[in-house]
Image: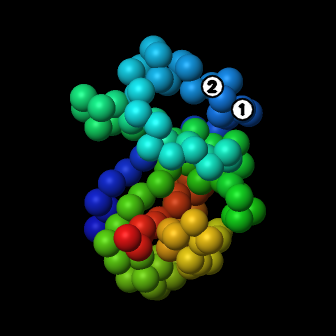
Amino acid sequence: MRATKIMANLHVADIEAAKGFYTDFLGLTTEEFNMGWVARYTSPETGVNVQLVTGDLTAAEDSRISVATDDVEGAYEEAQGLGFEIVHPLTTEPWGIRRFFVRAPDGTVLNISNHRD
């Protein structure tokens, strides 16, 4: 698998209540999207970002990081072949992302995804 981008997914109780810290103090002033349950904030100068998540909309368990890849199907097959636990099956979500969740050997859940633009 080839990761093209990795983002932290921070669990928060309320995105609107939490975002001021990340936008004002950390300077992540660009809101790339806000779906109510997940929002991404990015620095316009550096491109660094974070995703705030209250709880995943379709997966039974929340991921701690999101990893973008150009071949999500190949990554899914590789994860299965290596015997990793698939937490959320390969799915095309209603908002246009194709993704699956996999549990790393240390227990961390990763959201492996590809945006089909």
In the rendered image of this protein, does residue 71 appear above or below residue 50? below
What residue is at 41 percent from the left and 28 percent from the top?
28
| Image coordinates for residue 104, horizontal then vertical, percent | 52, 60
At x 60%, y 72%, the residue is 93
- Residue 68's mark? none
Residue 105 can be seen in this image: no
Q: Which residue is mark 2?
A: 18
Quadrant occupied by the N terminus: bottom left
Q: Quadrant of residue 69?
A: bottom left
Task: Determine whether the residue tagged by mark 2 lies in a helix, strand or loop.
Answer: helix
Q: State left or right for residue 111 relative to residue 59.
A: left
Judge whether 9 appears above or below 88 on screen.
above
- Provide the residue designation for mark 1: 14
Disc 1 secondary structure class? loop
**Relative image position of residue 101 (x, y in whole percent):** 57, 66
The answer to whether residue 64 is seen in the rendering is yes
Q: Nearer the viewer, residue 93 or 10?
A: 93
Indicate the colouring scheme.
rainbow
21 or 4, nearer to the observer: 21
Q: Residue at x 62, y 71 (%)?
A: 94
Q: Are marks 1 and 2 in contact (CB under 8 Å)?
A: yes
Percent from the top left, x then y, of residue 91?
Answer: 59, 78
Q: Residues within 10 Å of mark 1 (few under 14, many from 20)?
A: some
Which quarter shows the C terminus? bottom left
**What is the spatial separation of the Cα atoms under label 1 and label 2, in whole angstroms?**
6 Å
**21 is higher (above) or lower (below) than 117:** above
What's under tag 2, amino acid-wise? Ala
- Identity of the residue drawn at 68% across and 24% down: 17
Give the class, few, some or many, for how many residues have Cα within 10 Å of label 2's Cα (few <14, many ≥20). few
Q: Furthest-top residue in view?
A: 25
